[in-house]
Image (cartoon, coloured by chain):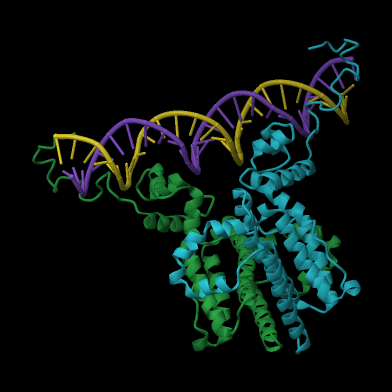
Chain colours: A cyan, B green, C purple, D yellow
Amino acid sequence: MPSDADPIASSIWVRPPKRRTGQPTLTREQIVRASVELLDTEGLDGFSMRRLGAKLGAGATSLYWHVTNKEGLLELAVDEVMGEIQILDPDEVGWRAALRGYAEGLRAMILRHGWITALFGVTPNLGPQSMRLTERATDMLGKIGFSGMELAYASSVLSSHAIGSAVVETAWRRTSERSGMSVVELMDEMRPYIDQIADDHPKLSEWYRDNPITDMGQLYADSFDFGLERILDGLEQWVESGK
Amino acid sequence: MPSDADPIASSIWVRPPKRRTGQPTLTREQIVRASVELLDTEGLDGFSMRRLGAKLGAGATSLYWHVTNKEGLLELAVDEVMGEIQILDPDEVGWRAALRGYAEGLRAMILRHGWITALFGVTPNLGPQSMRLTERATDMLGKIGFSGMELAYASSVLSSHAIGSAVVETAWRRTSERSGMSVVELMDEMRPYIDQIADDHPKLSEWYRDNPITDMGQLYADSFDFGLERILDGLEQWVESGK
DNA sequence: TAGCGAACTCGAACGGCGTACGAGAGTCGT
DNA sequence: ACGACTCTCGTACGCCGTTCGAGTTCGCTA
């Protein structure tokens, strides 16, 4: 340990250039960003306070100064990725494209950050980014002509469709990634299991025979689009017929 | 430890009447049922192999003879509650009521077993009960007139709506239960936070002012119904206009 | 310039977790 | 009587979230 008077050791040049202990080397924003990265690469199971601390070059317990809880930190991470969703202006792109963009943006965000599927049902999203998103969605839906409770209902049916679709798709993606197989290979893998129960499930086997699945990603995209178009049709019909 | 020849200790009357160790006192069905009960009462966080073992009067590690994993056991629990969903016959109740019943049954099941929201995105549902449900849904949708990929799409939009709606509602219910407050009380609790950000969210504050929420459960039920009706309208329109 | 209090980091420790392992008990067919 | 099979369980390992209190650095006031 050099004396304070030591002209060399006390010189800025010799001191470790950044990283002075006892100083705000950690910030909440930094922690949240690193959390999202760790969650994206390691998944929710691979996310721990110790690992996050290591990734940040800090002790795990140092995080607790900036964040109350692991649970609270996950809330912050959820809100962070909620901020990725954009809202389009219906005056520019038309009402249908604006509504479609909202649902598609939410779906794409969930597929980017699959870990969020396990957190949607845990805590309501009330962070600043979620509120900002709700504000803009409210504005958009108001411009289109929705008001009152039906404005909330319309927003809800779009987000529900996006969440429900993406959650189910994420389950397939996860098992595919974990096994290192494509989804089609996975289906082949379980062929014996499917054949075994085929007798008790005639309609299902018939459907699978007539509709062999070759590209799961495309299937989910088409399925999402079909549902979204039906929802938009239904909303349009409701608006036109009397409100 | 009594000798085998001991006439008293080896008598059936003296032996502990049931509960002979080394015998199949545990079954997989029993374990799965107890898991669902434990999950219902304690939630996913309160569910552990040790607690489950204690509930069953068995050692935690005994469970691993009947079940590969905690994760595998949770898959079984998910499949178990999937079996609660009924499918109606469209020839009896009409196509619209049959489709509505499917979505409502799924939604009600999720609200009964809120822990499932964190598991939907983890593993695809391929258990026997899920397959049976899919078989019956396929049959129902076929009777109504759907076929090919659009049969899957129609099923998907209904289940997505149910899952998405129920997941979001579950988040509110959970925080309400944990805090012991009703959702309306919760909203009052966060009033200062909402007021604080009101200036940056004019459309949102305006909407909240004009549409005060008094009953969250009713709101979610109405929201679900509205979305479901729009989806059914959209499906009907698609069927009628050219298929 | 000294010293105080706030801001921040971190090592040690506690109780709980999932589960691998191997020893053991009971049962059955031979 | 004896293996082989089925099933239970105590022990143990490594990881987890989190509490606590000690330690370091800084800005401010006296």
| Residue B205 percent coordinates (x, y) | 80, 67
Q: Nearer the viewer, residue A168 or A205?
A: A205
> Can residue B212 be seen in this snapshot?
no
Q: Nearer the viewer, residue B21 or B196?
A: B21
| Residue B121 percent coordinates (x, y) | 61, 58
Above or below D22: residue B174: below
Q: Nearer the viewer, residue B136 or A146?
A: B136
Give the residue displayed 75% in from the left and 55% down from the top. A127
Q: How many marks?
A: 0
> Can residue A159 be seen in this snapshot?
yes
Above or below B20: residue B201: below
Snapshot quadrant of residue A226: bottom right
Residue B11 placement, left or right of D24: left
| Residue B233 percent coordinates (x, y) | 68, 84
Residue A87 placement, left or right of A164: right
The quarter of the image holding the N terminus of chain A is top right
| Residue A49 percent coordinates (x, y) | 65, 39
Residue A220 placement, left or right of C27: right
Above or below B90: residue A9: above
Give the residue displayed 77% in from the left and 42% down from the top. A28
Snapshot quadrant of residue B28: bottom left
Above or below C27: residue B168: below
Give the residue displayed 71% in from the left and 53% down from the top. A113
The quarter of the image holding the C terminus of chain A is bottom right
Q: Nearer the viewer, residue D4 or B208?
A: D4
Give the residue displayed 79% in from the left and 56% down from the top. A83
